[in-house]
Amino acid sequence: MAAVKSKGALVGNRLAIASVLVITLIFLAPIYWIASTAFKPRALATTVPPTVVFAPEITPFIKLFTKRVQLTKPVDPAAYDAAPWWEQRILDNGERVLRTGANVQLSAYPSRFMNSLIIAITSTVLAVGMGTLTAYGFSRFRIAGEKDMLFFILSTRMLPPVVVAIPMFLMYRAVGMTDTHIGLIILYTAFNLSFSVWLMKGFMDEIPKEYEEAALVDGYTRMEAFFKIVLPEAATGIAATAVFCFITAWNEYAFALIMTNRRAQTAPPFIPSQLGSGVIDWTVIAAGTFLFLLPVAIFTFALRGHLLRGVTFGAIRK
């Protein structure tokens, strides 16, 4: 009987592993498709059936990072010989495009990518910082109407962004904050703050109050106890909250499209605008998307240990 149960458990484990592998492959398939398209020649990007084996090239990245114009006549051999290697690479592929000006001019993608970094990192720091302080107050002190206030904070996330996009745009235009970094930072911080407060309050509630009381008895002030006792204990929650807030701000599209135009435009609304010459250049769009995925993937991977919060949930006991 025991042998039958053991065999059944083994089969169940193998089925579970196989299911996890299949689900993982399904979720990784779009990532592979984007990454492979980013290194494909343009002619192979839309072939049917799809081209799986090909010689990778960096031409899409060259076109992504440089300004280009459509040529109206064949390239002069002398101009071809004088062109740098990356320009010759474009011309060798038969695409009538050439950089503008005597010197290499970068496209708008690097500045849009930097805008995304500045806005996402700043709004994440502000949202997590204010959310941690607010959650600590709700967790440690008796506040009149606490439940109503927490519900009000949560209610700010109940409306989809498209519902408030036009009113927010009109308000931002009235105060001159459209197409500014500070405008998007304030907006993303406000939308992430409710999530940060609720998530951090759960972590704060799990930290025993006796830790702080012991510190207060030893002569610590309330702020010293918070920074030296509570924050180290809440590091896992802060990291997990930061990951989710960063992903939300990094991927946000609707407000970035409506509230910005050039100076503060982020990468999500800029990448689809790379249509190429004549037809959509999917390789350039895939190259921009592939690079856009890297920061959030690296950030999430670096803090992956803190995302396994459920494994140790409730491990701290009073």
Image: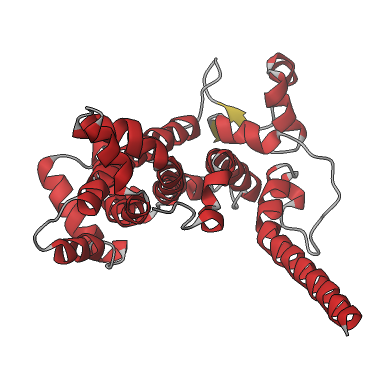
Q: Position of residue 250 (x, y in %)?
A: 43, 45
Q: Position of residue 277 (x, y in %)?
A: 58, 45
Q: Residue at x 25, y 41 (%)?
A: 213
Front-lying residue, 186 or 99: 186
Q: Position of residue 76 (x, y in %)?
A: 70, 22
User: Where is 206 relative to 118, above or below?
Assistant: below
* Quadrant assignment, res 80: top right
Q: Residue at x 41, y 48 (%)?
A: 241
Q: How many marks?
A: 0
Q: Residue at x 20, y 48 (%)?
A: 137
Q: Is residue 201 left or right of residue 252?
A: left
User: Residue lying furthest bottom in this view?
Assistant: 1
Could you tell me if residue 185 is visible in this image? no
User: Residue lying furthest right in this view?
Assistant: 3
Front-lying residue, 81 or 305: 305
Q: Is residue 48 left or right of residue 304?
A: right
